[in-house]
Image: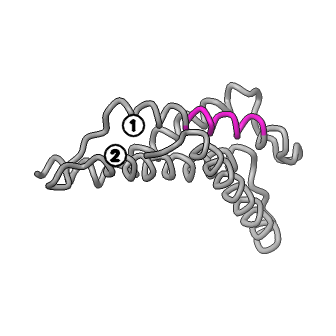
Amino acid sequence: MYIIKNEIDRFQKYLEAEYQLFLNQSATYKEYLDFNLSLSNCLADVTKHGATYIAYRTLAIASENADDEGSFQLGEEASEFVVAMHNSLIDYMYDRLLTDFDMTYYDLENEEQAGEIIEEVFSMAFDAALMPYQQEANEE
């Protein structure tokens, strides 16, 4: 069983760690390639990792309720979890990334573009993380 507040706190720490990894990667690109990663690169990268985290954590929670054969389905509880974590991701992106990022590399025309990037990448990364498990379930 999970406690959503604890899950969100842990997830926010994870997102911060991913952001710091991105900043380190960006510094490496700058040093060796003389290339700066933009805000859209940052949003996509951190979102991808955040979506994957949510997918794997959702699977772990759902598997706690597996039957004797190990089968489980993602039910309403999992859906509520995904929505809460997704909202936490959005909050982090707007409260931390969009306010902290070096404006020199701000490549978006408006915040709506940021939201579009986040939603598109989230959807693709979340689905990609779950795909092997969905195929496995379909084969059974």
Q: Which residue is mark 1?
A: 78
Label 2: few (<14), some or many (≥20) within 10 Å? Answer: some
Q: Which residue is mark 2?
A: 62
Residue plotted at (64% across, 34% down):
90
Q: Nearer the viewer, residue 106 or 91?
A: 91
Which colour assignment does the render follow?
A: one colour
Question: In which quarter of the view is residue 89 placed?
Answer: top right
Q: Amino acid at mark 2?
A: Ala
Residue plotted at (20% across, 55% down):
70
Viewed as shown, does residue 60 lie left or right of 121? left
Viewed as shown, does residue 14 lie left or right of 111? left
Residue 128 in the image, given as x and y percentages of width and height: 39, 49
Residue 64 in the image, given as x and y percentages of width and height: 33, 51
Residue 137 in the image, given as x and y percentages of width and height: 19, 49
Whether tag 1 and tag 2 are in contact, CB under 8 A, the answer is yes
Q: Which residues are magenta?
A: 85-95
Q: Does the stretch in magenta take in 3?
A: no
Residue 16 in the image, given as x and y percentages of width and height: 71, 53
Q: Amino acid at mark 1?
A: Ala
Q: Judging from the image, what secondary structure is the residue with disc 1 in? A: helix
Residue plotted at (54% across, 33% down):
84
Residue plotted at (84% across, 38% down):
99
Tell me which label, 1 or 2, sits earlier in the chain: 2
Q: CA distance from mark 1 to mark 2?
A: 7 Å
Q: Does the stretch in magenta take in 91?
A: yes
Q: Nearer the viewer, residue 98 or 69?
A: 69
Mark linked to residue 115: none
Q: Nearer the viewer, residue 44 or 140?
A: 140
